[in-house]
Amino acid sequence: MNVDYVAMHMSDGIVNAPISLLFAGVALVALAVCVAKARIELDERTVPLAGLVAAFIFAVQMVNFPILPGVSGHLLGGALAAILVGPFTGALCVAIVLIVQALLFADGGVTALGTNITNMSVIGVAAGYGTAVLLYRLVRRRRNDVPVPAVGAVAFVAAIIGTVCAAMGFVLEYALGGAATTSLGTVAAYMFGTHVLIGIGEGIITALTVMAVVRARPDLVYLLRTNARAEVTV
């Protein structure tokens, strides 16, 4: 296995070939949808931010630490990317990082690209952004102004949920076609427990980064731009 500081960065051979091919197809379809939908999210102001987000995620994902044999941990960045530049653009940012890492730095297997993209770029981003939207709207209903720390709290929880969901994506793939000898129960329990803790670290980094951008340029933050009925205050 090969995990991330918020999801699994799988190496080759963790799941069998049919499952790898299946999720390669899932990843291709999902990315095609993201390419089409990202045009709605991006404009001349937000394109540079998307580039900065991708570069930031690439940099922090290069710092790995061991979790299990063949499994390494690092920041995922899915919730962060989705909150700042939108879920479709965010998914593309994470996917580009994963492809570059696999092809140029052998970080994550080439045959596992489909599963890695599905987990981190699709599941992690979707779960993280969905949580962020739900929580932000709940905060908005209770008050006309949304303090920056409240936005940070939303980002913190979203990052944890995105991390754990991405990890559970790995568990599903392992259940369908795991090629290793470790039992599914052991893998599921370890991945869940480990990624709750990893998600806390992810949440802290995500919250701090989002709050910094909100204080400097709230007009660039996708979550705020598309849910703009409430004023964000310091």
Image (tube, helix red, strand yellow):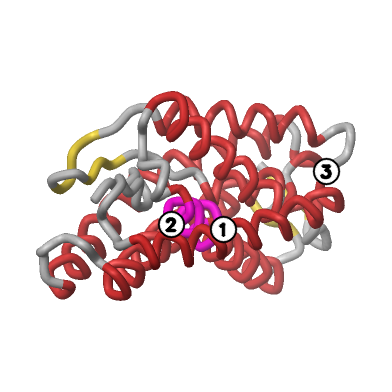
Q: Quadrant of residue 170?
A: bottom left
Quadrant containing the C terminus is: top right
The kind of residue tagged 2 is Thr
Residue 42: mark: 3
List x then y, in percent, for residue 74.
34, 39
The answer to whether marks 1 and 3 mark residues whose Cβ atoms lie closer than 8 Å is: no
Q: Earlier in the sequence, mark 2 or mark 3?
A: 3
Instruction: Give the alpha-carbon distance from disc 2 to disc 1, as whole Å.
Output: 7 Å
Part of the protein shown in magenta: 114-124
Whether 173 is among the magenta residues is no
Q: Reply above or below: 169 against 106.
A: below
The answer to whether marks 2 and 1 mark residues whose Cβ atoms lie closer than 8 Å is: yes
Would residue 41 be found to the left or right of residue 108 on screen? right
Would residue 225 be found to the left or right of residue 29 on screen? right
Whether residue 200 is visible to the viewer of this picture, yes or no, is: no
Q: Quadrant of residue 195?
A: bottom left
Instruction: Provide the residue designation for mark 1.
Output: 27
Q: Quadrant of residue 212?
A: top right
The kind of residue tagged 1 is Ala
Pointer 1 local density, CA inside 10 Å: few below 14, some 14–19, many at least 20: many
